[in-house]
Amino acid sequence: MTVPPGRRERKKAATRRKIADAALRLFLERGYDAVGIRDVAAEADVAVTTVFSHFASKEALVFEQDEDFGQRLLRAVTDRAPHEPLIPALRNEIGALVRHCTADGTAPIQRMIEASPALREYEEAARLRHAESLATAIAADPDRPRTTTACRTIARFVVDAYALARDADDPEAAVEEIFRMIEAAREATLPSADPTDTAGP
Amino acid sequence: MTVPPGRRERKKAATRRKIADAALRLFLERGYDAVGIRDVAAEADVAVTTVFSHFASKEALVFEQDEDFGQRLLRAVTDRAPHEPLIPALRNEIGALVRHCTADGTAPIQRMIEASPALREYEEAARLRHAESLATAIAADPDRPRTTTACRTIARFVVDAYALARDADDPEAAVEEIFRMIEAAREATLPSADPTDTAGP
DNA sequence: TTTTTAAAAGCTAACCGTTAGTGTTACGGT
DNA sequence: ACCGTAACACTAACGGTTAGCTTTTAAAAA
């Protein structure tokens, strides 16, 4: 493929960024619900159809950047050190993600999301998809739980941890607390011989 | 209240049932996405606005009956025998709910729901709301976990159990397996007198 | 270079779920 | 018998989304 990215792709990326920037500006200025797609298109000086050729939906305009949530969770599982146990690796990643979205300069965006039911639902639906892909990644891990049901359960618990910790008074402490529960749940899936034993026969 | 329900309320209920029946018939006949609200209104011989005065959304037409999910979970917590522990009570209720929706003559409806992303999302959003109210019910229970974060976590796990068990090959066994994990998670929130913890000194 | 292709963007017009505004009917309490 | 109002109808619109078709323009073929 063309190693120098080519003018076409650069222009496309520029248009995409122009749209996303215009959208976020208007959303923060007037409120998400008070801004229509037609407004966004006008502000970015593009056609409405162009907006939808770059973004699948109005909500997707808001979640442009942090759509690497799923990727990061997957990498936390697949790219970890050889003998590092599964759950703590996930806990560290969730902790980092929670820190990222609570401490950053993302406060106005977070407030906007909380204020709009449509955006909250969209985010929750995205988390479900992430849970599914995380479940298959966990199911392919040497340190996995024994049944696929258990893998999917752990995956759900992990993405739930993110949602719950963000809303807690002390997000970092909440991550710790929830992951103690997840760790216990994970151990309950092991062959019930010795509770201090994490490596089966 | 008026013990004889009155003609007005009877007519209202009849209209509601007429709409729901017409909708379900068309949905199963032609597929959910291929039927518009205007089709439903015409089939039920009512105006479009009447449909929306009885149902909040198109998706709500499908989930007409089993909207007692949340109620049943709440009652499982509040109406249980004086010293019955919390988690097993919830396990029994989830087990009953799973049995109800997998064994019944609801198979075509379930297939329709699985076939439509809009319906799946709607159901998942409803489950989230149920988790929230369940969390507050658990937080008011004498047998509750110690922190509100733990209460909310357990509530999420419980409603997740329903979703996961339904999709499993053996739903009843999945309920058992997931609730073993939930029970372990719940015990991990108790005062840690026992040093078989995951983070040893 | 010139020509050809196809991707990107544009425009118009619609579809569909949903709601507002405005009447009209008919039940229920007085 | 009368009034208030709940239920329903009708029309029109709004806002997100998509289809169909044309125009521009980068890139590859000639």
Image: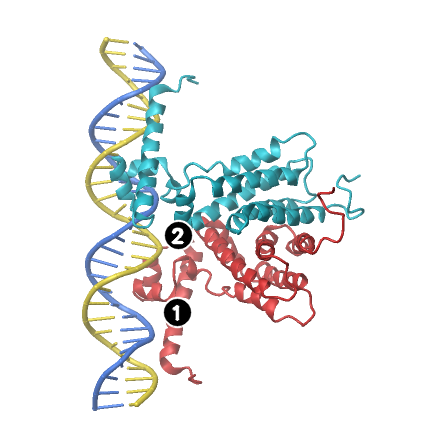
Chain colours: A cyan, B red, C yellow, D blue
Does residue B112 show up?
Answer: no
Q: Nearer the viewer, residue B23 or A114?
A: A114
Res B131 quadrant in image: bottom right
Q: CA distance from mark 2 to mark 1?
A: 32 Å
Picture mark count: 2
Q: Amino acid at mark 1?
A: Arg
Tell me where residue B200 appears, x and y as whole percent. 74, 43
Tell me where residue B123 appears, x and y as whole percent. 49, 55
Q: Which residue is mark 1?
A: B16
Res A64 quadrant in image: top left
Where does the C terminus of chain A fall, quadrant-wise?
A: top right
Q: Nearer the viewer, residue A159 or D12?
A: A159
Residue drawn at 42 percent across, 39 percent down: A105
Secondary structure under badge 2?
A: helix
Residue drawn at 38 percent across, 59 percent down: B57
Disc assigned to residue B28: none
Report the side of B4 relative to A192 (left or right): left
Q: Which residue is mark 2?
A: A115
Tell me where residue A78 appears, x and y as whole percent. 61, 32
Subunit ID for the residue under disc 2: A
